[in-house]
Image (cartoon, grey):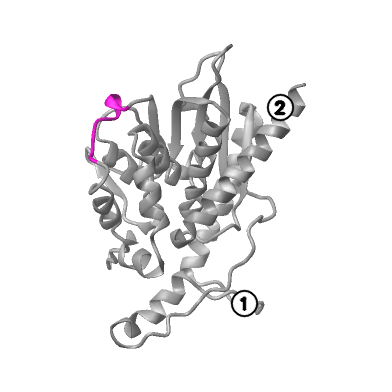
Amino acid sequence: MTKKTAALVLSSGGARGVAHIGVIEGLLEEGYEIKSIAGSSMGAVVGGVFAAGKLPEFKEWVCNLDKIDVFKLMDFTLSTQGFVRGDRVFNEMKAFIPDCDIEDLQIPFAAVATDIVNKQEVVFKSGSLFKALRASAAIPSVLKPSMVEGIELVDGGVLNPIPIAYVKQSACDVVVVSDVNAAVPCMLKEQEQTLIEEKGRFAPLIEKWNSFFPKNSTKQKRLSYFELVVKSVDLMQDRISEYIIEHSQPDVVVRISRETCGMFEFYRSKELIDCGKQEFHKSLKDALQRSE
């Protein structure tokens, strides 16, 4: 019996990228061996953690984050390059995922970042894993750029949200793309956002809190600066993703709506993982039916 193998490509997409965990779990449930991974931004984070053999530890950590935990991980700064440093979350991850060299990972892995000054992609296939993940996940105007060898690097999704060109693949591999920026209907039910009513030490944080985790509302309102940045990045990545998928023709495309959750809603990780797994199984079934 021929062994089923897959080359996996994971898109950028903020907290929605947690759904990639469900896609990976779905692949393994179907008996596929993941031979290589390439990712941008959150896709690079999930892919790199899996390649390091630490996905169970990462899943347990991210699934136990609540709103307060997520807020505490945001190390705010007054920098004009981004209002979150982005170091705290990666330092937290290092407690259970030791840094290592990419070339020493269990499977081939590539993370994509963007050289914003020279307008070109930078692909990490060697060197520090965490340095690559931090650079790939530096969302413009949100997380400060990462300085690597004197070059300012930002989110890989700016130029290449689905880095299929950098995944190592053989002729027998099934190429699977997980796209969490898709322009498709949202499959998750909208959840009532709960306000934190506790007074005392959390009271001064409420206003800033609501800017990241707004309550659902049917009222039309003007977009804030943060919302404009997020929606602009999402829309840009959606258009680039459509082009890449159309021209690369992967075997399986898992499409998860860009409306599934907000950029920082990591406290919804459990349902995001379930969503990713369900969408993978459905996408694989559709792909197999088309090939018959």
**Residue 121 place in picture, x, y as percent:** 41, 35
Given residues 116 and 2, the one toward you in this image is: 2
Q: Which of pointers 2 and 1 lies earlier in the amino acid sequence? A: 1
Q: Quadrant of residue 232?
A: bottom right
Q: Is residue 129 left or right of residue 108?
A: left
Give the residue displayed 47% in from the left and 80% down from the top.
195
Give the residue displayed 55% in from the left and 71% down from the top.
223
**Residue 42 place in picture, x, y as percent:** 43, 46
Q: Is residue 191 left or right of residue 51?
A: right
Q: Quadrant of the C terminus?
A: top right
Identify the residue under disc 1: 217
Q: CA distance from mark 2 to mark 1?
A: 40 Å
Q: Quadrant of residue 54?
A: top left
**Residue 20 place in picture, x, y as percent:** 50, 43
Task: Rate crowding at label 1 as few (under 14), some (14 to 19) or many (20 or more) other CA atoms within 10 Å.
Answer: few
Given residues 116 and 60, the one toward you in this image is: 60
Give the residue displayed 63% in from the left and 44% down from the top.
279
Q: Amino acid at mark 2?
A: Leu
